[in-house]
Amino acid sequence: MSRTPNLPSFLTDESVHVIIWCYTGGGHFFKENYQVIKDLISNSVPLCVIFSQAGAMVANRYGFFWDLKSNPLNYKSTIFLFSGLDVMKYNVQRILEEAKLPYSVIEPDPAFSMAISLANRRNTTIIISPMTSNTVAKVVNGICDTFITNLICGRLKSGKRIIGVPTDGLEQIILTNLPVRMIQLDKSQVINIDICKYGALKQEPRTKVSFDPKYCVGCKECEQMYPESFVSGEKLSLKIRKIDISNLKRLSREMKILKSPLEVKNTLEGT
């Protein structure tokens, strides 16, 4: 695994217009984010996708990397960057390598020099999607303690445009989809834990089968084999807090806020 990013030529050549897509830890709009990113890759648009630790974890659970593995693309104009090593052990690195995806892990850097360098790259569009309420709150209050928040704050300080797609929008209620989860098992049910090749299903001697979501890659093979015991895509209604709506309104004065990742394409075409 490369721990020091070897940046591709399209990212270091400022004559090339590059999209830097920051992926933070929200599951809302997963399908839409995945579709837009996949379309950009398919069209060979120079693209750098930067995952926060939580972002990588959530994307993996929803099957982001698994789906790319199942639908091979040409990645010569793509690089996936991960801001931290810890998440890689939860099958993220394994899936990336099985799928032959171009990736690298960003070394810890107290000065966040690489983030600031990317923030000041001239020929660049920066997108944050999904943009969680935690990310919004940090940026609004000037807290820059991660690679992505430093990238955002550095870009805003330079007066350059950023596009954000918040998971918690200005609506009071949102409806989102959940990833795979295990339903309460009946005592008589027998499940072969070996159907999960990635270790999300576990069983100690004389104990019930348990599901560890950290190791889930979103392949849904457990659901296909045992539909009475596993489920995905459940709808969950979430009430957005007033403070999160207030923070987003404040941030909308500094960046372009979109209601859905599907609006990104039209926005990019207008640039």
Image (cartoon, rainbow, N blue to C red):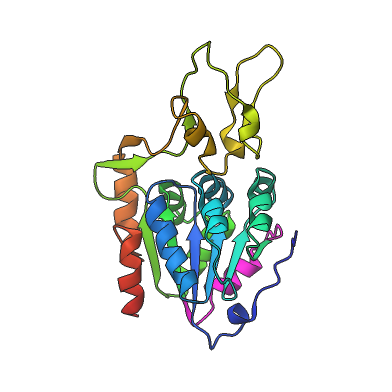
Picture mark count: 0
Residue 69, image x, y percentages: 57, 57
Question: Is 209 above or below relative to 45?
Answer: above
The residue depicted at 67 percent of the width and 61 percent of the height is 106
Residue 8, image x, y percentages: 65, 76
Q: Is residue 175 left or right of residue 115?
A: left
The residue depicted at 57 percent of the width and 39 percent of the height is 216
Residue 134, image x, y percentages: 45, 47
Residue 209, image x, y percentages: 60, 21
Query: Is residue 253 visible in the rendered structure shown here?
Result: no
Q: Is residue 164 left or right of residue 104?
A: left
Residue 261 belongs to the span the image colors magenta? no
Query: Is residue 103 visible in the rendered structure shown here?
Result: yes
Q: In this view of the protein, which residue sits in the foreground, 173 or 9?
A: 9
Q: In this view of the protein, which residue sits in the foreground, 75 or 161?
A: 75
Residue farthest toward the front in the current orientation of the protein: 225
Question: Is 54 above or below relative to 33?
Answer: above
User: In which quadrant will I find the C terminus?
Assistant: bottom left
User: In which quadrant will I find the N terminus?
Assistant: bottom right
The residue depicted at 62 percent of the width and 26 percent of the height is 192
Residue 119 belongs to the span the image colors magenta? yes
The residue depicted at 56 percent of the width and 61 percent of the height is 50
Question: Is 120 above or below relative to 101?
Answer: below
Which span of residues is magenta-colored?
Answer: 105-124
Residue farthest toward the bottom in the current orientation of the protein: 15
